[in-house]
Amino acid sequence: MKNFKRPALSVCILSLLVGCSGASEYSSEPSVNQSSKPAKPNIVIFYVDDMGYGDLSSYGATQVTTPNIDQLANDGIRYTDAHSPAATCTPSRYSLLTGELAIRNNAAILPGDAPLIINPSKPTLPRMLASQGYTTGVVGKWHLGLGRGDVNWNEAVKPGPLEIGFDYSFLLPATGDRVPTVYLENHHVVNLDPSDPLSVSYVERIGDRPLGTERPDLLKQKADLQHSATIVNGISRIGWMKGGKSAEWVDEDFHTVFTDKAIDFIDDNKNKPFMLFFPFHDIHVPRSPNAMFEGKTGMGPRGDAILQVDWMTGRIVDALEEKGLLENTLIIFSSDNGPVLDDGYADQAVELIGNHKPAGPFADGKYSAHEGGTRVPMITYYKGKQQTGISNALISHIDLYASLADLVGYELNTTEAIDSANVLPALLDADADARDVMVEEAFTLALRENSWKYIAPFEGSTPGWLANKDVRAGLMAEPQLYNLSTDIKETNNLASQYPQRTEKMAAQLQKILDRKQR
């Protein structure tokens, strides 16, 4: 990525940075003077998969270097207390795009053939921006379901992104470790040969492709039983796939395929306001970075995939600069949940970790109710229009809906994005406050109130495949209470010592869950 200079404070639009949301619950209060806003900026949201708080060199990593992302952090705002809405991918994406807690829709990790989880009639972030003159696109991993169930991949696949407000989509339909292993552009599978129709099953074996359980000699990476069905491109996946040979992706090409599509979208829409949602496949399993990154970190495919993320980010930012768009583009970079090492494939992520700390100083990672599950790196960059630096504001990605609505001059109705707080000042000023209270979703729920953290009792059961994950998951049958200002690792449960605070936070969490409107 080319060098771009730190904006001088004298050109920052300080009049935009008056007050803060001070949201004490999951609500939004307009806080920015509409008349002081600049022309509507382009918006680019980079959403990495499974990247932890400590996975970037700007966040303290030393075994991997991420210069392109670091430059955004150095010249923008780097957040120390930003969170994905949930500790897993589907719920976080649901919340980002709807401004609602995923638990309100029972959103959980979806199978590869799941129907669209966002009702097409529901208000969404892209639809809101479209109402204000934006063209919106999504390029990358979707994993929010497609169709209405029992998808016929040989016909138009809908409803999908276009039915919830996006104008353009180029998708990895579910995840890299699930079939179908094909690209979907708008409503249609790319390069599909009608004489070789595509079928997918998550119930029984179909087709004659070899399976990971039968032909381990064909695998680039061995996998656990969950990931050992149909083999495509030397990697066994979840589920069975028949036909569609001409449409198969090559994992090692993701870096150019998705990046080129994103740049094409930018080029096609450079003369009008646009929003690009760019959810990476990396660094989710299976980790298969291109050969240009292979072996560069000494941490195996996971570490090398971080380099790939940095390269892709740099290419897109360069494209914005080359097209004269960077000065009027708000860039938001973050991750959909915390990190995970062993997530089903034998890629030596555990063995080669060395001194690297994927979750930084926090406990656990993906799937967990502890801080490592949702506290993720987050950076905003808006050239010349920010008070830059390090922000300690408490922020959730669920807040992007209300905050971007305020930025573009859209007034939310009382039943829209009901859990989204307007934290726009904190997106533009490193010294501005944001939330006081925030919900974190995992297999149970947690509530942050400033430095206090309450984790609700868990009485259910977790999936069997969670057993091999390198997390404690933060699950206990009794309530948990931690003071993060003195116990960042969440090791000293204070619930019995502070019963009134514990009961108060439990009631506060329930009040949020009971809310029906803003």
Image: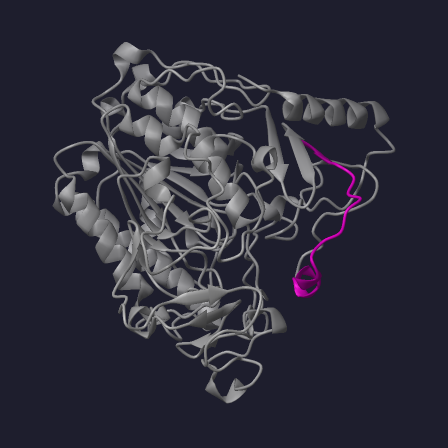
Q: In this view, does 69 lie above or below 424?
A: below
Q: Where is residue 165 in the image (x, y as percent from the top left)?
A: 33, 35
* Residue at point 52%, 23% (across, down): 418
Q: Which colour scheme is used?
A: one colour
Residue located farthest toward the right when viewing the structure as drawn: 496
Q: Is residue 430 visible?
A: no
* Residue at point 81%, 35% (across, down): 494
Range shown magenta: 451-469
Q: In this view, does 318 lie above or below 64?
A: above
Q: Where is residue 457 in the image (x, y as percent from the top left)?
A: 78, 39
Q: To which quarter of the image does residue 245 belong?
A: bottom left
Is 85 a magenta residue? no
Q: To which quarter of the image does residue 454 belong?
A: top right
Q: Can residue 313 be seen in this view?
A: yes
- Relative to the observer, which residue lies in front, 418 or 450? 418
Q: In this view, does 441 lie above or below 247?
A: above
Is 462 a magenta residue? yes
Q: Position of residue 122 (x, y in %)?
A: 44, 29
* Residue at point 76%, 22% (across, down): 504
